[in-house]
Amino acid sequence: MRLGKSGVRAGGAGLVGLALLGCAAAAQLGGEQTGAVEFFLRGGIFMWPLLFCALLTVGFIVERLITFQRAQTDTRKLMAGLVRTLQGQGIEPAKELCVRTRGPIAAILHAGLAKVERGTDAVEKAIDNAGAIELAFLERGLILLTTMGNLAPLLGFLGTASGMIHAFDAVSASGQAGARVVAAGVAEALITTVAGLVIAIPAQGMYNYFVARIDHYVIEMEQSSVELLEALTELKA
């Protein structure tokens, strides 16, 4: 299962935009403000924790995309080459093939081949253990995305409450209830809400994508281990 380059870029576009917007705000606090910086600052104090969430989310998404790209393997080609090497050259060349191939599939196959001398049960156990380790590596840190997906909207809603408080304070201070009086507070409320959703939506979308990729790897691991065991059985026959 793959996500096209355009889909990945779209998934992180909103987060990158918010991050760059916040950095620009920090750089221009003392100088002339652009429209984008002014928009960021009008969101109030809660835009800063939202910016931090955006930076964490962007960084993690990029790191996971790189990790999954490196883990990607042509499993059919690997298994065809492995079976051919086992039948024609033996165990050691097959192990070397796995070492030369990157990714979790090759890692679990190598772990199984390393226990061939101890029998089929040992091979299965080695594959299961290696699979658990590789799966844990692929799932590492995914809780961060779910945390950001839950936390960002809550921070946005907190900013909404803060903005409404400021709006009512302005009405109380001026003694009037005109649109101009409450505009700043309402703007703060809406901006933080939007910012929270801009972070949460891509975070949740990318989390689902990563989980789908992991499920795909699990299926490939299971199929590859079965094929390896069948090849070893035929080799001994």
Image (cartoon, helix red, strand yellow):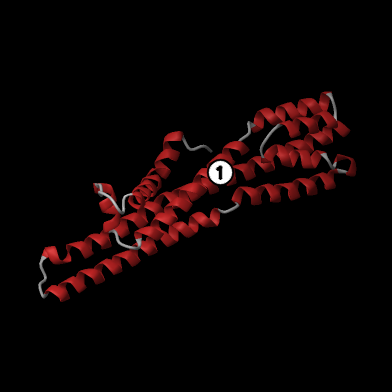
At 23% from the left edge and 60% from the top edge, which residue is drawn?
A: 187
> How far across and down, in percent of the image, does residue 57 sit?
47, 51
Report the side of 173 relative to 206 (left or right): left
Image spot of residue 118 (x, y percent): 89, 44
Say whether residue 227 is left or right of residue 4: right
Nearest the eye: 217 or 33: 33
Query: In this rendering, is residue 233 above or below 124?
Result: above
Figure quadrant of residue 218? top right
Q: Residue at x 39, y 58 (%)?
A: 50
Q: Residues within 10 Å of mark 1 (few under 14, many from 20)?
A: some
Q: Kindly indicate the quadrant of the structure image that contains residue 213.
A: top right
- Residue 153 vs 161, above or below: the answer is above
Query: Is the residue 105 above or below the residue 168 in the image?
Result: above
76 is higher (above) or lower (below) than 44 = above
Secondary element at tag 1: helix
Horizontally, is 143 left or right of 13 in the view?
right
- Residue 209 in the image: state x and y as whole percent: 50, 45
Q: Residue furthest top?
A: 88
Task: Residue at 20%, 62% (x, y): give it.
Answer: 184
Q: Is residue 237 visible?
A: no
Q: Position of residue 151 (x, y in %)?
A: 43, 62
Residue named by callout 1 = 213
Query: Where's the C terminus, which quadrant?
Result: top right
Q: Which residue type carries mark 1?
A: Arg
Can residue 159 be seen by looking at this rendering?
Answer: yes
